[in-house]
Image: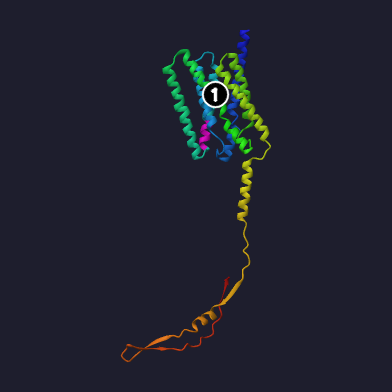
Amino acid sequence: MIRNLAHLTLAFGLLGNFVSFMVFVSPLPTLYKVYKKKSSFGFQSAPYVVSLFSAMLWIYYALLKTNAMLIITINSVGCFVQTCYICFFLFYAPKKARMDSMKLIVLLIVVGFGLIVVLTQCLASGVTRGIIVGWICLVFSICVFLAPLGVLKQVIKTKSVEFMPLLLSVALTINAIIWFFYGLLLGDVNIAIPNILGFTFGIIQLILYFIYKNKKPVMDKKMVDFEEKISEMEKPKIPAPQEHNIINVVQLSAFICSDIVPVVATLNTIGYQDECVAIEPQPRKFEPDHCIEVAA
């Protein structure tokens, strides 16, 4: 009976490794979209950073236990894959998103994990250290399953499943079921309990996917309205007909100058100004009319 239980535990562990590997590679279609758009706008790095931190914690926890080689193998792969994803995200992320991701990486990976290792090594020993690290793993495993809550909120708000791939949701649900039975057979509550929550959120993601998969995204509607307004603004406007008045420049000039009498100063014999003589205007020669068209 005990041998059969051990074989069953090993089978669930191997199956869990395989499914977990599929979970790690499931975001590849999402990363391909980022590569095509040359931008990570709309995608978040938080799930990858939290998953990397969780994988590092599980490796540390497995090193403190016995018969935990299957946990070490899959989480080692997870650390490598999540690191690649984070680097890819940072490469295509806008400046603000890149800075936010770097702050989260420093907070969790450098400060958080570093403090956990230092404090547990200095303040605990033996079995107590394994129990403390186990509870820490349990809490952060729950955080891993809570990370998609931001995606669920975005799906409900935009009515679009663009940022929630179906493959990832299915893989997470199956993965949670398998690791739950592995932890149950192994007698490790730190493995079993978080995966109950993972299974629950996986079901919710699948339900939301089938609800919104055929609905038009709200973002697309806004973009269509915006493009229609832009097209209306770019349409050439035909000016309304205006009345035109024709002004004869020559006649206007003659009218203005008709009342002006030139005055010429005369010089006496000595060369000084003596008096001013008004000169009658002379008739002007014929000049062609120049008309200017002025809008009223």
- In the rendered image, residue 153 lying in the magenta stretch gets the answer no
User: Colour scheme used in the picture?
Assistant: rainbow
Query: Does residue 288 lie above or below 47 as drawn?
Result: below
| Residue 159 occupies quadrant | top right
| Residue 197 occupies quadrant | top right
Residue 23 in the image, given as x and y percentages of width and height: 60, 26
Query: Does residue 218 lie above or below 196 as drawn?
Result: below
Query: Does residue 241 lie above or below 73 as drawn?
Result: below
Q: Residue at x 45, y 22 (%)?
A: 116
Amino acid beneath label 1: Ser
Residue designated by label 1: 141
Few, some or many C-alpha atoms within 10 Å of disc 1 (few <14, some 14-19, many ≥20)? many
- In the rendered image, residue 86 lying in the magenta stretch gets the answer yes
Residue 28 in the image, given as x and y percentages of width and height: 59, 32
Residues in magenta, as a range: 84-91
Q: Viewed as shown, does residue 147 lie left or right of 118?
A: right
Q: Residue at x 48, y 13 (%)?
A: 127
